[in-house]
Image (cartoon, helix red, strand yellow):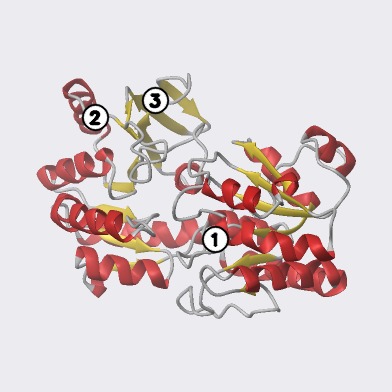
Amino acid sequence: MRIAVLNNFYPPRVGGSAHLSSLLAQKYAEAGHSVLVVTCDYDGAPRVERAGKVDIERLPAWRLPRLGSLVAFDIRFTFRPKSIRRLVRLLDDFRPDAIHIHGQFMDLAWLGSAYAAKRNTPVLLSVHTRLESPKTAINAVFRLIDRALVAPLIRRADPTVVVMDALMERYVTTTYRIAPRKREPIPVGIEINPNTSGVSEEEIRKKFSLGPGPIILSIGHVIALRDRIALAKALPAVLEEFPDAQLVVAGSVEYPEFLSVAESLGVIHAVHCLGRVPKTDVMDLFRIAAVEAHDLQGIGMGTANVEAMAAGVPVVVAVASDNFPGLTLRDGTDVLLVGPNQPDQVGAQICRVLREPVWARAVGKAGQRLVADRFSIESVTQRHLDVLSAMVASH
């Protein structure tokens, strides 16, 4: 097949959507398919690049201004006449059998959907993020945008939609009115044995100016939907029992309210914000982490959670045990479950991990086995290719 992959977010930009779309593109190519990636330019990356067997075209992009809580994230759009014409030429020259679009509320999704509708090309749409906010007024604005603008723009191509968990399935059903026959439950996929730097744990701590105490790792950008406030509120109880514990946040801080909370609670000294870190550094940080926690508001379980589990790190996450269709997460066995925005529960789970290292290691090992069985990029890629092949055959 000839597969075009469209995503505004793509490496060197970091993030779950960028990383997964890159992994899938590489695996599609390794399986013998022709792959073209179209994305935004980012931080000096080449406009035209061949990475392995994947051709990458980066279109000129402009960054959406930050608007406080409404838009506090690095969002880039390619939308301009020259880029639109370039996208159409690229796709016409490539002649895709199918288009795999990542993300539903970015302009490449809308432009790709319009192209596919005109050229009668099947579309697979992976919805990575729900357009939601924890703030009621902002959420009302997002719902209006989602239903009035995003839904008709993406539905025009009649896509088959990849839903990665139960929460996402409910979201695409109620917001975009995607019928059951057009939904495919496929979880996130990760590399089971990613590269690390190979340096010692002592050197890792030294590199990030961390002390010898236990590391509570929190991976990913701090945004309103992953605000780390419950984690900050859990710190006093953790530090009372383990005064040398350190909270290490690896990701850009776009929504800094948790730092104010930590300051007010007198625990800011235990918080280390590393900013954006390369993938290899993340893998190194997993090696020194006692526990990982970042999805604590009930919005789902993302790539970073699964990567931490694959590294054998116990993960605290606010999801239901049936978060993934056909799979039951076992609290205290392969993952550590808490309620949304429950700092007392978060603190209790972290303290138990630090207090009971033998049990914690068993949880980490069980999580590792679960991920290897259900979330490997190889098995997830094959599920995507099966869906794409069926779409092309029936189109």
- Across and down, in percent, residue 22 comes to 48, 42
For residue 377, the mark is none
For residue 41, the mark is 3
Amino acid residing under circle 1: Asp
173 up-or-down from 282: above or below = below
Classify mark 2: residues with Cα within 10 Å, few (<14), some (14-19) or many (20+). many
For residue 87, the mark is 2
Instruction: Out of 66 and 60, give the one closest to the viewer.
Output: 66
Give how far apart the Cα atoms at labels 3 and 2 are. 13 Å
Mark before the other along the chain sequence, 3 or 2: 3
Mark before the other along the chain sequence, 1 or 3: 3
Horizontal relation, residue 378 to residue 194: left or right: left
Name the quadrant containing residue 203.
top right
Name the quadrant containing residue 37.
top left
Question: Label 1, on which residue?
Answer: 295
Amino acid residing under circle 2: Leu
Classify mark 1: residues with Cα within 10 Å, few (<14), some (14-19) or many (20+). many
Horizontal relation, residue 362 to residue 129: left or right: right
Amino acid residing under circle 3: Asp
- Across and down, in percent, residue 388 comes to 33, 56
335 up-or-down from 377: above or below = below
